[in-house]
């Protein structure tokens, strides 16, 4: 029976209607007031994304939100009184206590001020994956952050790294540098893997780092991440000494226009422009460019036959377009070009005068969740560049093509995987000026695959392991690069790690394919000195000529087979040609009976590139095919922040390098008449003593033949090439201390040490050699930084001391004396135009003339003024 209400209607008939009304009214009745707003930077007014907004009561978080790309946020909470906390990395927390949230909600604009000093920055390079804090990184890392970049006008990105832990920067000109991490430098070094927005930034086939060829302006640099130590497990070949990663500003995050004009000593003029705009929430673009001109410090190299031009001039630009179709997807396309109109760059063959050397690139990247991929091409055109010692042109129109894919997945709740593949093809194009007859057989294909895993073992322990395999088309075997690290976080701001890394460097294009003539000896028939790469088969010397080494000579008589014939190591077989050459000079040797090996011996000498003379040797050693040098490293590191005012970093490492590729050296001995034997023989057959002495001296001074390998294309040329050496072991350490003395003043000091600055090694043939570090084994740096946002003032004094060290890099052999350099900088943001900054900087403030690398000019003071305006 139905229940009736007072109106006489059954309850069963109106109850559903009331329920629907109540359900509809429920959300309106329960709706809470909204707190909405925008978060901006105190200095630039730029919208800040990624800021966390929390409403708290006591220790409980009642509601929270994160600001989006426009700096906007919105959250709901019951009306009442709260503690508002807004936090973002690199910025001081913003707290409002109490904050009254009225029943009808409210909106506000929150202005965040940057932290003057930061101890635990975010980076992505150490694990080639998601962002992580420096304290969590499984490697020794440094970050040059946005604020440091903005405060210091720079001619190249290297200018920011002078005082960075573990880095040695050797200035070789106004904009030229050689930079290494933990030693093992070189003229035209490529030991450090340099990236620009994940793109390899080296000159393609030469594989050298020329930092003033990178088309990036300092206005467009967001930060620079530096990873010290081997990195091949993630980045593949040629990252055995670390990674230097330049990360530019995304156009979505940094919109507007910035113009910087700098000028100073050495006739310096440097103008830069950057503009970025966003079109709604989906599209954004940026364009940047620069022009720089100056006069380099003078240098006189007596071996140079071409007059060097001390003008340094370059122009560069790049364009980037970003598309963000959704919150977790993006597509980026960019192109850039740098034109080195004039510059002098060190090479192992001497200085090169760069003329109109163009470096350009095109890059496309895509990201969808944890999937990412990119493809890019780097193109080099050396223009009218030439070597200043020989006058030879350098033709380089090489290309590097790269494709990379990466993905990640969470396995269970604790294991995070990142995996990917890299493909690249290097195409040298030198018109025969560098790779000579190898011009059409010098392309290199490489492929690598890697997997990187991180697992939380406990609340304080994290295990990181990685493995990578690489294929190189010119190496016999694939190469494996493992990595393992245990990271402990005993406290919130403390980390301790122990890591093992194995990395490798592939032989360079020169080491594999070089084929150029470096000079000639003034002999009756010119004996050329040829620089060659090591072929796939290596070089082997025949030892079947009367049971010993074989020689070849341009003086071999036709009846013995001519210049291509292999002869026993006996120069007396060439006596008929000696008689003919003497006759052309008016000397008649025909009455003298031809000597035999029992009368006159044969001696071997090897050309000394430093002295130009021949050093005695006893034989020749085969050269095996080149192997990839391997670098193993075990490292113990600590990093901590104490009392939010003191930072401590300590790294101790043990490194082993095997199959180290030595510098260029002569590998083919020359055969000579034994002067004493020849003099005695001539006297014995009736030649007057004075004449015998003169004839023997002249004949014995001529390289009569060359002991050349079977693979040599030129039968009697003297060959200069490369070979692997054995094991090189060393210890090293880096110390970094930082302290915030007051909210506006900070101090920092670093010291780096390597146990040796040169190493005794033995090559594959058992021959000893000395391998220099080509960098200082002891160096220290300090900086004093003051920042006061309230008055818009920043200042810095930094200094560095570098101990003396030996250098042997191609033609550059000598010692760099110890030096100390002091730099200073002061910047002021105008009070009536807060987006205009005036900066005065001085490199080598005390004008202490010093040389930082053999073959480089003495470096003096450089004072530079700069005005930066943002719109």
Image (spheres, grey):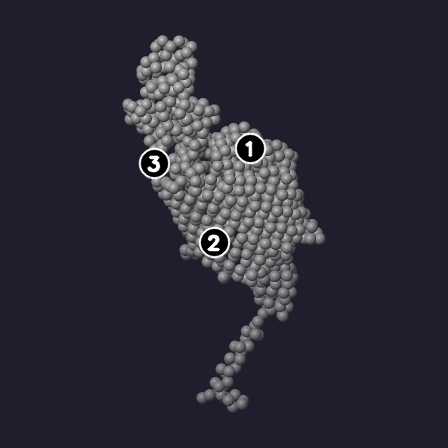
Which residue is more in the foreground, 94 or 862? 862
For numbered disc 3, what is the local secondary structure?
loop
**Label 2 belongs to which residue?**
364
Asked which quadrant contains residue 30, the reply is bottom right
* Disc 3/disc 2 C-alpha distance (Å): 38 Å
Rendering coords of residue 840 (x, y %): 66, 43
Picture disc at residue 307: 1
Rendering coords of residue 510 (x, y %): 43, 37
For numbered disc 1, what is the local secondary structure?
loop
Which residue is more in the foreground, 31 or 616? 616
| Quadrant containing the N terminus in the rendered view | bottom left
Q: Residue at x 34, y 15 (%)?
A: 590
For numbered disc 2, what is the local secondary structure?
strand
- Circle 2 Cα neighbour tier, 10 Å, few/some/many (<14 / 14–19 / ≥20): some
Look at the picture and state if 564 lies above or below 357: above
| Quadrant containing the C terminus in the rendered view | bottom right
* Disc 2/disc 1 C-alpha distance (Å): 42 Å
The answer to the question of whether label 3 and label 2 lie on touching residues, with beta carbons closer than 8 A, is no
Residue 593 seen: yes
| Nearer-N-terminus badge (2/1) | 1
Furthest residue toward right: 832
- Circle 3 Cα neighbour tier, 10 Å, few/some/many (<14 / 14–19 / ≥20): few
**Label 3 belongs to which residue?**
537
The answer to the question of whether label 1 and label 3 lie on touching residues, with beta carbons closer than 8 A, is no
């Amino acid at each position: 029976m139905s229940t009736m209400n007072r109106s006489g209607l059954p309850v069963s008939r109106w109850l559903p209607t009331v329920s629907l009304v109540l359900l509809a009214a429920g959300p309106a009745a329960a709706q809470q007031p909204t707190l909405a707003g925008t978060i901006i930077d105190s200095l630039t007014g730029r919208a800040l994304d990624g800021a966390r907004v929390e409403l708290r009561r006591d220790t409980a978080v009642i509601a929270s939100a994160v600001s989006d790309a426009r700096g906007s946020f919105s959250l709901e909470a019951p009306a009442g009184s709260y503690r508002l906390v807004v936090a973002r990395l690199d910025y001081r927390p913003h707290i409002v206590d109490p904050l009254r949230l009225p029943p009808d909600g409210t909106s506000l604009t929150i202005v965040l001020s940057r932290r003057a000093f930061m101890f635990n920055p975010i980076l992505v390079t150490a694990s080639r994956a998601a962002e992580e804090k420096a304290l969590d990184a499984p490697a020794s890392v440094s970050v040059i952050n946005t604020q440091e970049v903005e405060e210091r006008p720079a001619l190249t990105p290297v200018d920011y790294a002078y005082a960075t832990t573990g880095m040695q920067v050797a200035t070789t000109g106004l904009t030229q540098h050689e930079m290494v991490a933990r030693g093992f430098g070189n003229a035209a070094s490529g030991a450090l893997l340099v990236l620009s927005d994940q793109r390899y930034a080296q000159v393609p086939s030469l594989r050298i780092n020329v930092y003033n060829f990178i088309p990036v302006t300092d206005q467009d640099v967001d930060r620079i991440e530096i990873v010290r130590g081997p990195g091949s497990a993630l980045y593949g070949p040629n990252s055995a000494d670390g990674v230097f990663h330049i990360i530019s500003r995304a156009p979505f995050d940094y919109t507007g226009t910035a113009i910087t004009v700098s000028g100073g000593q050495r006739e310096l003029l440097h103008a830069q422009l950057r503009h970025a705009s966003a079109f709604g929430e989906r599209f954004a673009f940026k364009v940047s460019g620069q022009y720089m001109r100056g006069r380099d410090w003078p240098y006189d190299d007596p071996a140079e036959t071409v007059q060097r031009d001390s003008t340094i001039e370059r122009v560069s630009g790049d364009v980037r377009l970003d598309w963000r179709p959704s919150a977790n997807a993006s597509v980026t396309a960019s192109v850039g070009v740098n034109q080195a109109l004039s510059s002098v760059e060190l090479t192992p063959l001497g200085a090169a005068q760069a003329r109109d050397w163009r470096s350009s690139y095109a890059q496309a990247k895509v990201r969808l969740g944890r999937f990412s991929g990119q493809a890019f091409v780097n193109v080099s055109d050396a223009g009218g560049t030439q070597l200043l010692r020989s006058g030879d042109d350098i033709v380089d129109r090489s290309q590097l093509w790269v494709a990379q894919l990466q993905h990640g997945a969470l396995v269970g709740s604790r294991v995070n995987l990142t995996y990917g593949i890299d493909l690249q093809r290097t195409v040298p194009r030198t018109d025969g000026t560098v790779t000579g007859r190898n011009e059409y057989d010098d392309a290199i294909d490489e492929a690598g695959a890697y997997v990187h895993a991180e697992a939380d073992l406990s609340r304080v322990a994290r295990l990181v392991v990685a493995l990578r395999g690489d294929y190189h088309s010119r190496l016999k075997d694939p190469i494996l690069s493992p990595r393992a690290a245990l990271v402990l976080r005993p406290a919130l701001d403390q980390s301790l790690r122990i890591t093992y890394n194995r990395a490798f460097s592939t032989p360079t294009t020169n080491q594999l394919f070089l084929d150029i003539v470096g000079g000639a000896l003034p002999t009756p028939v010119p004996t050329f000195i040829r620089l060659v790469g090591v072929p796939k088969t290596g070089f082997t010397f025949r030892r079947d000529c009367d049971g010993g080494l074989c020689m070849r000579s341009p003086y071999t008589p036709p009846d013995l087979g001519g210049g291509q014939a292999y002869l026993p190591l006996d120069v007396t077989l060439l006596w008929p040609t000696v008689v003919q050459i003497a006759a052309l000079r008016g000397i008649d040797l025909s009455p003298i009976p031809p000597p035999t090996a029992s009368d006159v011996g044969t001696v071997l000498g090897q050309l000394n590139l430093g002295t130009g003379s021949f050093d005695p040797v006893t034989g020749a050693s085969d050269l095996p095919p080149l192997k990839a040098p391997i670098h193993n490293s075990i490292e113990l590191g600590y990093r901590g922040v104490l009392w939010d005012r003191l930072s401590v970093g300590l790294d101790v490492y043990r490194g082993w390098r095997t199959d180290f590729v030595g510098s260029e050296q002569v590998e083919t001995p020359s055969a000579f008449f034994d002067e004493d034997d020849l003099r005695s023989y001539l006297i014995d057959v009736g030649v007057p003593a004075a004449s015998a002495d003169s004839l023997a001296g002249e004949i014995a001074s001529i390289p009569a033949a060359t002991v050349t390998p079977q693979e040599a294309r030129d039968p009697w040329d003297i060959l200069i090439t490369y070979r692997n050496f054995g094991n090189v072991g060393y210890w090293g350490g880096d110390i970094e201390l930082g302290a915030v003395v007051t909210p506006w003043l900070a101090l920092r000091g670093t010291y780096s040490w390597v146990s040796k600055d040169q190493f005794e090694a033995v090559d594959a043939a058992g021959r000893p050699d000395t391998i220099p570090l080509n960098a200082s084994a002891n160096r220290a740096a300090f900086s004093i930084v003051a920042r006061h946002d309230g008055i818009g003032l920043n200042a810095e004094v930094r200094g560095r001391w570098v101990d003396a060290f030996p250098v042997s890099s191609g033609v550059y052999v000598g010692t760099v004396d110890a030096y100390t350099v002091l730099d200073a900088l002061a910047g002021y943001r105008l009070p009536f135009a807060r987006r205009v900054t005036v900066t005065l900087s001085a490199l080598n403030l005390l004008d202490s003339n010093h040389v930082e690398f053999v073959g480089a000019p003495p470096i003096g003071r450089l004072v530079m003024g700069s005005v930066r305006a943002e719109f």
